[in-house]
Structures are given as structure tokens and as C-alpha cells.
Image: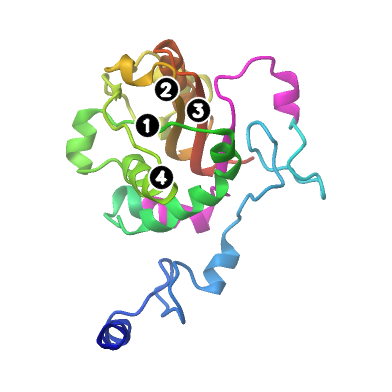
Amino acid sequence: MLYGLFEKILDFILPYRCMKCGRVLPEPGYLCDGCSETMNFIGTNCCRKCGHPLYEENTGSKMLCAGCLDRRRSFYRLSRSAVIYDESSKNLILGLKFLDRTENANLLAAMLKVAGKDIFEAGADVLIPVPLHYTRLIKRRYNQSSLLAVRLGKMVGLPVDNFSLIKHKRTRPQTEFSGRERVANVKGVFSVRYPERIKGKRVILIDDVMTTGSTLKESSRVLRRAGAKSIDILTVARVVG
């Protein structure tokens, strides 16, 4: 009885608020209805391999996009993203990444849990966040992908390995490059410190945004070389267009 009273007092003093607009929510949650409607969730109408949105109606989750039909080999087993990267999702992601809005990781991890349903059903052993170079980690004080992985790991009951995959070479931000330049910028910058932790494991690689996939591809390449059984990709958002 006293606990229930305490909860009501706490809800009155510190009500749940929308993480985008700050509006008080009528019940526990992350987004108000209005802000939720502005998010372009990808859902199940996507390529069953790479997760790219399919715009034909009623395609379900059994179709392959043109890119996957043409591609003979892939560096991952499955790839999924929760939302399309646009102005609505960008505010939440950049808030986490650069503005110390670490509380956003709770919402974004919950979105990853929903988006990764196919991946979790296929089976996984460990979550590995895309690492930052140590100089950037010191400057930023945290790795947003690691925060996402830790929150998601608690939600789905999977361990997080923050130490096996490392970025041993500092690079300029990928946003400064396009196309082939992005591939060259991350070539050979990742390595596996503890291959014994990777060998035979089904890995889910966690990142905030997939743009061209260059960073994720290079990360996956070194994990494969270290003996990972399979690699799946799970990101909050992906650039489409």
C-alpha cells in the first residue's frame, strides 16, 4: 500500500515525458503518439536479407531486394534497422551521440529489440558494438553503440563484448566521405584483440546508423577472419535513397 502511494507521488513529481518533445505521457513509455507517428519505422515490409525497405504493398518479409538478388556473397547473415534515417530519427540519434542524451539509449534499444526479431529468432550468442578509436572515446566519454548494446543485452538476455573488437587506427569521420572513399577510410582500421572469444560465436554487430555499410562490412570482415560462425547487423537507422 505504501509502495503504491510512493509510486503515485513519484509519478506526480517526475512524470514520464516524451523523449522528443517533452510532453507528459499518460502512462509509462518513450514517445507521445504525435512523435511516434513522425518516425518512419521500417517494420516487416523489407528485404528478408539486408532489411532495406520494400515499397511494394503486401510483399511481407519473404522478398529480396534487387541488390540482394544480384549479390552472390554477403558479409553478414541478416541485417535489420528500426527506422529510416531522417529528421525525426536523427534528433534522437544525434542527441545520444553528441549531446549527452544517454537516456535516449533506452528508447533506441527498445526499437532495436523490435527490429531484430528475425535475428534473435535465428539465434545469437553475443552483441558486439562497433568500436571507437580510444582518442575519440576519451573525447566523447562514451561509445553510443556500446550504450545501445548494453541496454539491448539486458532486454534480450544476451552478453555484450566491448573489448574483443577494437579500432586501432584513428580515422576522419565517415561523414566527410562518400562512396569508395568511405571504404578506403576504414580499410584495415579494425582488429580482434581476443579471437578466442569470437571463434564459433554467432555475433550481432550493433551500430547507430548504416549509411553505405562500409564500417559494418570492415568490422564484419575481421570478425569473420577471427572465426565468428555468423554475423548479423542491427542498427537503429539506415540511410535510404
Task: Please tell me how crowded label 1 is: few (under 14), some (14-19), or many (20+) other residues with Cα within 10 Å.
Answer: many
Q: Identify which amino acid the numbered label 1 is placed on.
A: Val
The residue shown at (34%, 80%) is 15
The residue shown at (32%, 59%) is 103
Where's residue 86, x and y in %? 54, 51
Structural distance between the alpha carbons of marks 3 and 2: 18 Å
Q: List the residue tagged with mark 3.
A: 178
Where's residue 71, x and y in %? 69, 18
Question: If you read the primary sequence from the N terminus, does the residue marked by circle 2 or circle 4 appear first?
Answer: 4
Q: Secondary structure at mark 1?
A: loop
Question: If you read the primary sequence from the N terminus, does the residue marked by circle 2 or circle 1 appear first?
Answer: 1
Structural distance between the alpha carbons of marks 1 and 3: 19 Å
Q: Residue 130, labelled with which disc?
A: 1
Q: Identify which amino acid the numbered label 3 is placed on.
A: Ser
Q: List the residue tagged with mark 4.
A: 157
Q: List the residue tagged with mark 2.
A: 219
